[in-house]
Image: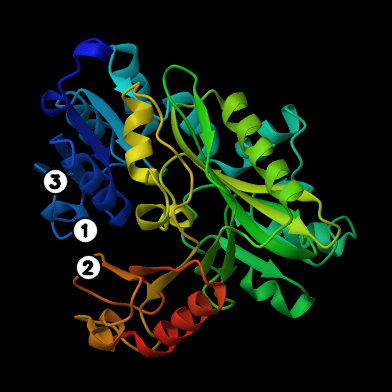
Amino acid sequence: MNTLNQIHLSEIKIGILGGGQLGKMLITAASRWGMNTFVLDPSEDCSASSVCNTFIKGDFKNYDDVYSFGKLVDVLTIEIENVNTDALIQLAKEGKQIYPEPGKLQIIKDKGLQKSFYDKYDFPSPHYTLYTDKISIIKAIEGGIQKLPFVQKLCRAGYDGKGVSVIKRNEDLIHLLDGESIVEELIDIQKEISVIVARNKLGEIMTYQPVEMVFNPIANLVEYLISPAPIAPEIAKDACDLAIAVISAFDITGILAVEMFLDKNNKIYINEVAPRPHNSGHQTIEAAHTSQYEQQLRAILGLPLGSTKLISSSIMLNLLGEQGFSGLPVYDGLQECLKIEGANIHLYGKNETRPFRKMGHVTIIDNDIINLESKAKIIQQTLKIRA
C-alpha cells in the first residue's frame, strides 16, 4: 500500500469475513470512497453479496477458505467473531494486514478468555465461574457451591442472544446450555449501555457517546436503543473512560463495542466486547458526523479518525421477524412508516424471515425527545415483518 499521503483508496482491496448486514453497511461506507471490497460467506444470498465487488463462497470458519481468501486482499477485517483465527495468524506472519489483530480476536471470541483478560487488568466485570459443561454446573448447585440466580454464557459462538441462558430458580435449570461456559452473578441492572470506541493504527482513540440498549425479554437481543443514553454526564464520562482503557489494554486496531451494565448503585461493569461494528452503533449512520462503519475503515487504514459528535438525538429500532412467521418476508406498514419525518429505514435484503431474526433497523432522528419517542412508538406498532 502507498504511504498515508499518497494513498489511493480505489486500489485497496478490503476483505471482509462474513457477509451479514454489518458487512453490507461496511461496504456501503467503503463505496463512498470507491474502495474494492471482497466478501467471504457460505451463503450466496447473504446481505453483503449484492453490494460487494467480489463475492467468494466459502466458510469463514474453515482454515483453507480463510487462508485462500486472505491472499486475495490487501487488508482483512471481520463482521463476525466466529472465524478461523489459525488461518489469520498464519496470514499475519506472512505480512498480511489483519484487523482486529488475530491474537486479540482469539481472546475476545472466547468468553472465558475474555473474562480472564478483564481480571488481569482489574476491569470491573461481574463475578464468574468457568464450567466445562452443564452437568458440572448442576453438581456445583447441588453441592452448594454455585448459587442462584445467575447468567450462563457459552464460551464460544454465542451471537444475537443465542448461547445465553438466565437461570433464576431451580425450574429454569432445564434451560441450561451444554458446553464450556461461564456462569456470572446476576447484576441488579438499572440500564444496559454501550460505548463504541475506535483506535487507528497510529494509536489515536475516540469514543461515541454511550447509548442505552433495551432488550427483548424473550429473544434476549436488542429491541431498541436510545442515543445518547439518558444518564448523568459523570456516568457517561466514566463509561467512555472505561471503553478507552479496554481498547488500549487490548491494543486493538479498529472498532470495539464495549457493552456495559449500570447497576442500581450507578456502578459500571463490563458485560462483553465485540471487535467490529456493532448493533449498538447503527444510529451513527444518520445521527453522528462519522458512522461507525466509516470509522472502522479509517482505523484499519491508518487514516485520521472522524468526528464522533452527534448531529441529533436518535432512537434505533431493530426490525425483528414476527413470531409465528417463516419464509419470504412481507413488510406490513412500510408505506406508512416511510411518511414519518426523520425515520431512516434500513432493510437488510434477507430473503427469509424467522421469529426474532434481524431483518433491518430504523433510526429515527429528532432533537425533541417527545417527538422522538412518539415516532418510535408508532413505528414499533406499525412496521411488522411477516411471511
- For label 1, the residue is 47
Q: Classify the position of the N terminus by image quarter.
A: top left
Q: Name which quarter of the figure residue 75 lies in.
A: top left
Check whether the beta carbons of the residues at disc 1 and disc 2 lie within 8 A of each other.
yes
* Amino acid identity at mark 3: Cys
Among the two numbered marks 1 and 2 on one chain, the one whose residue lies closer to the N terminus: 1
**Helix, strand or loop for disc 2:** loop
**Helix, strand or loop for disc 3:** loop
Among the two numbered marks 3 and 1 on one chain, the one whose residue lies closer to the N terminus: 1
State the residue in front, 125 or 279: 279
Position of 373 with respect to 125 (left or right) is left
Q: Is residue 243 above or below residue 149?
A: above
Mark drawn on residue 350: 2
- For label 3, the residue is 52
* Amino acid identity at mark 2: Lys
Task: Give the crowd class for mark 3: few <14, some 14-19, many >=20 residues within 10 Å.
Answer: many
Which mark's residue is nearer the viewer, 3 or 2? 3
**Cα distance in 3D space between marks 3 and 2:** 15 Å
What is the count of numbered marks? 3
Residue 329: percent from left, percent from top = 22, 81
State the residue in front, 41 or 284: 284
Identify which residue is drawn at 24% across, 12% down: 5
Identify which residue is drawn at 35% across, 79% down: 321
**Helix, strand or loop for disc 1:** helix
